[in-house]
Amino acid sequence: CLAISLDEKLMVTVGTRKDNKLIIWDLTSGGIITRCKLEADVKAVTFCPASGGAKYAFVTAGETACTFYSVDPYNGVMSSEKPQCGQLKRRYTCLLLSPDGELILAGTETGDVATFSTGNKI
């Protein structure tokens, strides 16, 4: 899966279950900014508004959780945070950023939808 940043300068790609590589691309130069290997299979990714001084932010949805990431494209530093879901255990299959950029809607394989705020994240 892949997503392009809101300003169209970055792209994030995530490989299949075989490699689970997440790569951040600079769309201006075509170069790789940073990469990492993910612990779990990812089904969807979307960029969202950054907060807390982060340059760029995106969310992945997978078999066990949604994860918020921030990345600084100038030094390649990336960090992540999983939102608190209490006892909620779902397998996420898709993501949608609300038109106002305030919410991430995460669809599950059972048809449920979880809602996460993009504020107060990384």
Image (tube, rainbow, N blue to C red):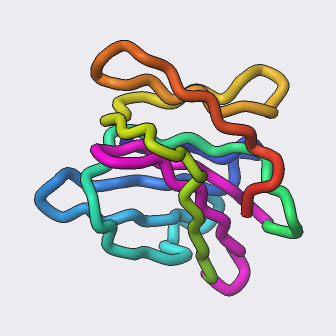
Q: Residue furthest right?
A: 53
Compared to residue 119, the image places residue 103 above or below, namely above
Name the residue at 50% across, 20% down.
Answer: 113
Image position of 107 (left or right of 62): right
On the image, which quarter does residue 53 sit in? Answer: bottom right
- Residue 11 lies, in percent from the top left, at 55, 53
Image position of 74 (left or right of 88): right
Compared to residue 118, the image places residue 71 above or below, namely below
On the image, which quarter does residue 71 sit in? Answer: bottom right
Q: Is residue 122 magenta?
A: no
Q: Which of 117 and 12 is in front in this view?
A: 117
Quarter of the rendering occupied by the C terminus = bottom right
Name the residue at 37% across, 13% down.
Answer: 111
Quarter of the rendering occupied by the N terminus = top left
Q: Residue furthest front?
A: 87
- Residue 80 lies, in percent from the top left, at 57, 68
Magenta-colored span: 55-76
Compared to residue 65, the image places residue 111 above or below, namely above
- Residue 40 lies, in percent from the top left, at 27, 58
Q: Residue furthest left?
A: 18
Q: Residue furthest bottom?
A: 75
